[in-house]
């Protein structure tokens, strides 16, 4: 038996703006002293909290402890774009079409959405945080439209519907003349991700799950009878541990040299006043993903979600040490300001209120790590940039594995290959970032 020791902890730059705009929250306690539990979950994001909910469904009388390194909704769960996508969304392809069994992946993604929908109902989470409005792939060039056309044809071959939008329809939606066309797909749920995660955590607490915050795990070690999960101020002895830490899995020594640690950057406007809204036009809520996966994601939200704001997200950087730098942030902020100004010249120069970095983890072959790592230690990790849906699925699956339940989710993820080995350093970082910069340049208008 081995011990799993965290070599480093997650580092975040900038606020988790989705959480900040919701206002103050009640924080959970810090773990202090020693205790026992039937299950311990390391990580309180989409995967970890979904695992806790599924465990509560399968073993309602069990004692469950969640250990979150920071505060709920301050990590990746408060830093993503909030798209819970049902359709194939392969970030390594030209048009999102997957390379595996797309019908199976669609079915699984919709199981994640259904699980989240039931959570919203059961825990009385604000429906504005779970908007079943679909999304649009925006296209600003003939090349991008060709990507959308290819994707639409692929969806049609799967029996899925989509709707082409012309430039006028895109302007009526967004208030921007930047987009020449778009492709609407109806099945995506657009989240206020921090609002959903806060509501999920509150619901779990009401169900008797103990969620400890500011309790980063330093070590998981086996003693004579149990796994002991150690934090700076306390420990929990348990028979079963679920690691739901996404790319931080590598920090515990698991799948080293096989996980790509990336950062994406985002910015958010202030709450737009009546004059700015009049200049902007368009609808009060919409979500645009780029037709080229290396383009720019845009969202507009309204007062029920945290203010009338526009979110811009772009700029990918491989950072094997999982630590963005202020210089990286400053460059990304300049790029995002240009992207915003180009799309909304009527608001050009508007200073962003929030700029932040968000961590994501990919494997070269697109697989997750959802399996039993060692007797009693399970993983719900590697979300491949699809944290809301894939994180929910791996969390559900890990909980089912722990309880000995076989399902379509467990069958899918346990049958996947291991993540492919990556090229050695420094070639990995230099080469990957050169490719990312070239792809961003190629998709610069998207």
Image: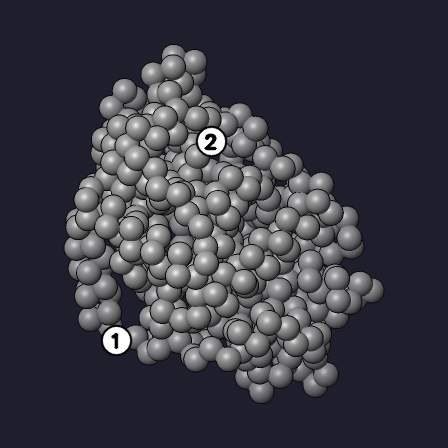
Image position of 371 with respect to 11: above or below: below
Q: Mark 2 points at which residue?
A: 285
Q: Position of residue 129 (x, y in %)?
A: 58, 39
Residue 69 locus on image (x, y percent): 55, 56
Q: Position of residue 384 (x, y in %)?
A: 41, 62
In the rendered image, which quarter contains the N terminus? bottom right
Residue ID at (54%, 63%): 108
State the residue in front, 112 or 207: 112
Which mark, by number, is residue 423? Answer: 1
Residue 103 point in image, percent of width and height: 47, 65
Residue at 64 percent of width and 55 percent of height: 115
Q: Is residue 404 left or right of residue 90?
A: right
Quarter of the image for residue 55 reads: bottom right
Check the image and report above or below for 262 versus 268: below
Residue at image position (30%, 49%) is 148
Residue at screen point 17% across, 50% down? 442
Mark 2 vs 1, N-terminal side: 2
Q: Taking the image as drawn, is residue 200 in sight?
A: no
In this rendering, the label closer to the viewer, 2 or 1? 2
Which residue of the protein is positioned furthest toward the top in this rendering? 275
Secondary structure beneath dot 1 equals loop
Q: Which quadrant holds residue 177?
A: top left
Q: Is residue 141 left or right of residue 155?
A: left
**Label 1 packing within 10 angstroms: few (<14), some (14-19), many (20+):** few
Pick out the residue farthest to the right: 61
Quarter of image, res 410: bottom right
């Amino acid at each position: 038996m081995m011990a799993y020791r965290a070599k480093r902890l997650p580092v975040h730059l900038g606020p988790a703006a989705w959480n900040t705009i919701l206002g103050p929250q009640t924080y959970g306690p810090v773990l202090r002293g020693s205790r026992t539990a039937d299950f311990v979950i390391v990580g309180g994001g989409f995967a970890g909290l979904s695992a806790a909910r599924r465990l509560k469904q399968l073993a309602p009388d069990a004692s469950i402890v969640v250990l979150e390194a920071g505060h709920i909704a301050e990590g990746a769960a408060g830093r993503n774009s909030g798209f819970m996508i049902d359709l194939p969304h392969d970030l390594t392809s030209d048009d999102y079409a997957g390379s595996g069994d797309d019908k199976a992946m669609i079915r699984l993604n919709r199981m994640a959405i259904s699980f989240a929908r039931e959570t919203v109902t059961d825990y009385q989470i604000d429906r504005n945080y779970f908007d079943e409005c679909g999304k649009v792939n925006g296209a600003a060039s003939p090349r991008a439209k060709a990507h959308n056309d290819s994707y639409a044809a692929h969806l049609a071959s799967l029996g899925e519907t989509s709707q082409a939008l012309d430039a006028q329809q895109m302007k009526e939606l967004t208030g921007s003349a930047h987009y020449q066309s778009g492709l609407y797909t109806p099945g995506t749920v657009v989240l206020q991700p921090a609002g959903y995660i806060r509501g999920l955590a509150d619901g779990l607490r009401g169900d008797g799950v103990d969620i400890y915050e500011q309790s980063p795990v330093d070590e998981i070690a086996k003693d004579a009878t149990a796994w002991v999960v150690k934090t700076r101020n306390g420990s929990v002895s348990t028979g079963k541990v679920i690691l739901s830490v996404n790319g931080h899995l590598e920090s515990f020594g698991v799948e080293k040299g096989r996980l790509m640690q990336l950062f994406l950057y985002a910015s958010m406007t202030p709450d737009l006043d009546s004059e700015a809204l009049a200049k902007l036009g368009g609808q009060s809520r919409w979500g645009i993903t780029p037709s080229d996966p290396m383009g720019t994601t845009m969202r507009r939200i309204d007062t029920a979600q945290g203010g009338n704001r526009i979110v811009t997200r772009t700029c990918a950087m491989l950072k094997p040490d999982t630590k963005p730098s202020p210089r990286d942030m400053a460059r990304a902020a300049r790029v995002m300001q240009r992207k915003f100004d180009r799309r909304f010249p009527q608001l050009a120069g508007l200073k962003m209120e929030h700029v932040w970095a968000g961590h994501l983890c990919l494997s070269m072959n697109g697989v997750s790590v959802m399996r039993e790592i060692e007797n009693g230690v399970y993983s719900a990790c590697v979300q491949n940039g699809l944290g809301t849906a894939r994180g929910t699925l791996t969390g559900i699956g890990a909980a089912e594995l722990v309880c000995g339940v076989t399902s379509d989710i467990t069958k899918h993820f346990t049958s996947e290959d291991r993540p492919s080995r990556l090229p050695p350093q420094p070639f990995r970082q230099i080469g990957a970032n050169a490719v990312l910069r070239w792809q961003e340049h190629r998709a610069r208008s998207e």
